[in-house]
Image (tube, rainbow, N blue to C red):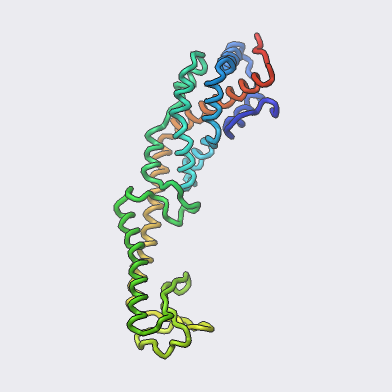
Amino acid sequence: LWVLDKTKTPMGGRMLRSWLERPLLSVTDIDRRSSAVAALVDDTIRREELIAGMTGLGDMERLIGRIVYGTAGGRDLTSLRAAMEKLPNLKEQLSGFSDRRLTELTAELDTLDDISGDIAAAICDEPPFSVREGSIIRDGFNEEVDRLRHILKSGKGVMAEMEAKEKEKTGIRTLKIGYNKVFGYYIEVTNSYKDLVPETYIRKQTLTNCERYITQELKDLEGKIIGAKERCIALEYQMLCKIRESISNEVKRLQKTARALATLDVLASLSEVAVNNNYVCPQI
């Protein structure tokens, strides 16, 4: 196996091992496989282009499995999209061969343009690792997601405006508005300015060097921002689930193409080894 395995994809590596563990018994099948390897051996330029095209393709079979079982995240979908975007070039290179088995593989290789296009339209280029963080869906794909994101972005600006307004109103130069997961948004005032704190401020927390307060206006704004964030994350997750379900409906096409890629990877690996080691095509 260590001599023969020059495959570029994990699925090709698994297929080569299965071929070695279960050798062909049919002379016709052996000749078809040998003929395909010989065709790749004889066309150096196209063989090397195919090998380069499969480099970095990843493990489509495993990605398909995660999608079908509903465990795929945004990064899995972008990885699948990146693999599918290599398919048109591979199919074009493969179509240049007249060998029967390679011609069959050309027909089996679906470029999956519609699926990769759907993923590209919906999923951003660099989604977070967790599906519960949001920021998965691309801007412009869904109006409601865009609206909620606008609330979140404008909310940050409103917080900055509120901070500037409170500084001016109270005369507390060190006043700042902060946030943490325990207390939410708060107004922080250092101890040296405690005497200037208005009566409308409600003490929330006492620290060594400062006091933290809230106001009704701040609580109202916090509810709006946090509500928008939670709604946006939930909506993005729902949309991710729908996209996974849509791709799962095309699982047969995906699996057929993944098998064709694995087969091509193994044949290309055998041809590369044959060239490098000066192997001779056997007559059975």
Question: Residue drawn 41% across and 34% down?
Answer: 250
Residue furthest out toward the top: 283
Above-or-below relation of 263 to 195: above
- Residue closest to the eye, 39 or 64: 39
Above-or-below relation of 125 to 173: above
Evaluate whether residue 247 shows in this view.
yes
Question: Residue drawn 36% across and 88% down?
Answer: 199
Evaluate whether residue 29 shows in this view.
no
Q: How many marks?
A: 0
- Residue closest to the eye, 227 or 102: 102
- Residue closest to the eye, 208 or 65: 208
Q: Is residue 58 left or right of residue 107?
A: right
Q: Is residue 109 left or right of residue 24?
A: left
Above-or-below relation of 44 to 230: above
Residue furthest out toward the bottom: 195
**Quadrant of the drawing holding the C terminus:** top right
**Quadrant of the drawing holding the N terminus:** top right
Question: Residue drawn 38% across and 62% down?
Answer: 229
Residue 75 coordinates in the image, percent (x, y): 48, 46
Residue 95 coordinates in the image, percent (x, y): 46, 19
Residue 279 coordinates in the image, percent (x, y): 68, 16
Question: Residue drawn 52% across and 30% down?
Answer: 53
Residue 163 coordinates in the image, percent (x, y): 37, 75
